[in-house]
Amino acid sequence: MTRIPGTTTIPLADEKACYVLFHQPTMGLVRAAEGLLSAALAGWAVKNFRVTVAAEVAVSELVGEAVCGMRAAGRADELEVAIRLIHRQDGRYVRIEIFDKVPARHAHRAGSADFADLDLPNTAFGRHSMDDGSWTWAEINLDR
């Protein structure tokens, strides 16, 4: 795993790498996550336009929602954004994960309901709340 502070340049991704970005909840984090995703997709040689667009929309929505939620809660804790390439028997996926330390704000939401209206092709969303925070994720199938 490569940890990249929000102020560094973003290197091309290696297929076995997981890139993680830690940043204060600002709109700068949204832009940094978009850049990290673009570098990862380029490094993994993803050339499918539909996959790229779905991943770009997903990262913007997930990170933007997390930033807005943290700011609305008056919190300045760092958010963690991870971009991963996942290999399974049924194909390859790019997975975008957001971890925040405010579990209560997600307690009333049901799984992926927040992002169901995005209607992105070959994309699944999910959320898992824990005592110390919550994970929100999107997976985009690269092989469909």
Image (tube, rainbow, N blue to C red):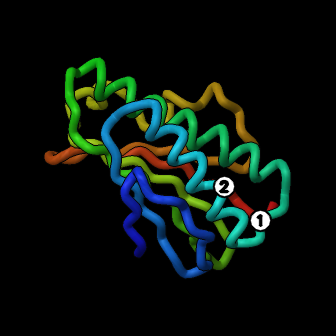
* Pick the front one: 59 or 88: 59
- Amino acid type of the residue that numbered disc 2 sits on in the rendered structure: Ser
The residue at the point 47 percent across, 66 percent down is 19
Judge from the rendering whether residue 96 lies leftward or rightward of residue 88; answer left or right.
left
Residue 140 is situated, as x and y percent measured from the top left of the image, at: 66, 54
Which residue does the numbered mark 2 point to in the structure image? 38
Mark 2 closeness class: few <14, some 14–19, many ≥20 residues within 10 Å: some
Residue 32 is situated, as x and y percent measured from the top left of the image, at: 51, 46
Judge from the rendering whether residue 78 lies leftward or rightward of residue 62; answer left or right.
left
Q: Which mark is residue 85?
A: none
Residue at the outermost top position: 72
Mark 1 or mark 2, which is nearer to you? 2
The quarter of the picture where the C terminus appears is: bottom right
Mark 1 closeness class: few <14, some 14–19, many ≥20 residues within 10 Å: some
- Amino acid type of the residue that numbered disc 1 sits on in the rendered structure: Val
Which residue does the numbered mark 1 point to in the structure image? 46
Quarter assignment of residue 40: bottom right
